[in-house]
Amino acid sequence: MGRGGFFSRSDLGGRATGCVVGAKVVAALGLGADPIGAEISVDTGAFTVIGVMEKKGESLGFDRDELVMIPITSAQDLYGEAARKRINLDFQARNTES
């Protein structure tokens, strides 16, 4: 995380409307120097920015700075059960031994 926080366990159970965004999203939407607390639209839903990811850049043609992440339970509300079939998981080891 660059600023703010990420989702908590209670966010998943409570159909939370918080989102975490990439740096380019902040710039593209004109959210300013402190976007935490700003409201954005994701399709038909309104979400409040709770965190901004640190700049990651592009990898394999995918720019991680252009992401908007919402809790899976909120995605299900917006997109139905099909949302579970479109989950992307990214992992990073702490060191080479891990």
Image: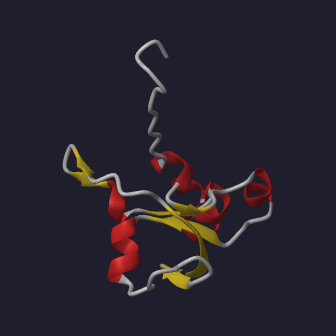
Decide if residue 4 is on the left or right side of residue 13.
left
Asked if one can make out residue 88 in the rendered structure from this viewpoint, the answer is: yes
Residue 10 horizontal/vertical position (percent)? 80, 56
Is 36 rendered above or below residue 92? below
3 lies above or below 85: below
Compared to residue 68, the image places residue 88 above or below, namely: above
Report if residue 44 is visible in the image.
no
Residue located 45% across and 85% down the image: 31
Question: Looking at the picture, how far across and down is residue 84, in whole percent?
Answer: 56, 49
Q: Is residue 65 left or right of residue 16?
A: left
13 to the left or right of 81: right
State which quadrant residue 14 falls in: bottom right
- What residue appears at the point 52 percent right and 54 percent down from the top-left corner? 1
Q: What percent of the width, then of the height, locates residue 34? A: 52, 80
Furthest residue to the front?
33
What residue is at 45 percent from the left and 81 percent from the top? 33
